[in-house]
Image (cartoon, grey):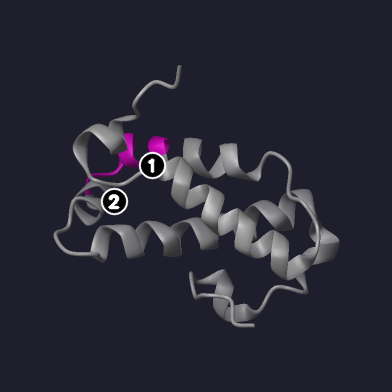
């Protein structure tokens, strides 16, 4: 059984679900799997949340700001992950995605 994360306890956000969505969209865009990326993003979000007051405040924001920010951060972190783990695919990712922008068909 999965243990509830600190982000889940303190916000309405589900980092594993957001990581799954972000990785899934990039996998579809690139046409291949990114094994280990989902776990990395969810764990990294928890680490940043535990150690950064500004990030905690941002994710605790009212309305959709916290959710939208977590999506943007995860897209940014995923780009870095691809650069480290799949460097040949990095050039295929649009520049706006590097800073959290959405992929467009």
Examine the structure image and report whether residue 27 is included in the region drawn in magenta: no
Quarter where residue 22 is shown = bottom right
Q: Which residues are magenta?
A: 46-53
Question: Which residue sits at x=38%, y=56%?
Answer: 70
Quadrant, the N terminus:
top left
Residue under numbered circle 2: 55
Question: Which residue sits at x=32%, y=41%?
Answer: 49
Name the secondary structure under disc 1. Answer: helix
Measured from the top left, where is residue 96 in percent x and y?
56, 80
Question: Which residue sits at x=77%, y=51%?
Answer: 33
Q: Residue farthest to the right?
A: 88
Between 43 and 22, the one nearer to me in the picture: 22
Quarter where residue 89 is shown = bottom right
Quarter where residue 63 is shown = bottom left
Decide if residue 67 is on the left or right side of residue 19: left
Q: Residue farthest to the front?
A: 1
Measured from the top left, where is residue 12 in percent x and y?
24, 46
Measured from the top left, where is residue 11 in percent x and y?
22, 43
Q: Residues within 10 Å of mark 2 (few under 14, many from 20)?
A: some
Examine the structure image and report whether residue 52 is included in the region drawn in magenta: yes
Question: Which residue sits at x=29%, y=36%?
Answer: 8
Residue under numbered circle 1: 48
| Residue 56 numbered tag | none
Q: Residue farthest to the top?
A: 1
Q: CA distance from mark 2 to mark 1?
A: 7 Å
Name the secondary structure under disc 2. Answer: helix
Main secondary structure of the magenta stretch: helix
Decide if residue 4 is on the left or right side of residue 96: left
- Labels 2 & 1 near each other (Cβ < 8 A): yes
């Amino acid at each position: 059984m999965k243990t509830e994360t600190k982000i889940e306890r303190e916000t309405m956000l589900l980092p594993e679900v957001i990581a799954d969505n972000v990785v899934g969209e990039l996998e579809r865009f690139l046409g291949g799997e990114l094994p280990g990326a989902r776990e990395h993003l969810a764990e990294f979000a928890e680490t940043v949340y535990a150690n950064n007051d500004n990030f905690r405040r941002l994710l605790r924001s009212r309305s959709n700001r916290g959710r939208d920010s977590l999506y943007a951060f995860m897209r940014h972190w995923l780009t870095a992950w691809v650069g480290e783990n799949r460097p040949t695919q990095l050039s295929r990712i649009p520049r706006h995605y590097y800073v959290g922008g959405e992929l467009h068909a």
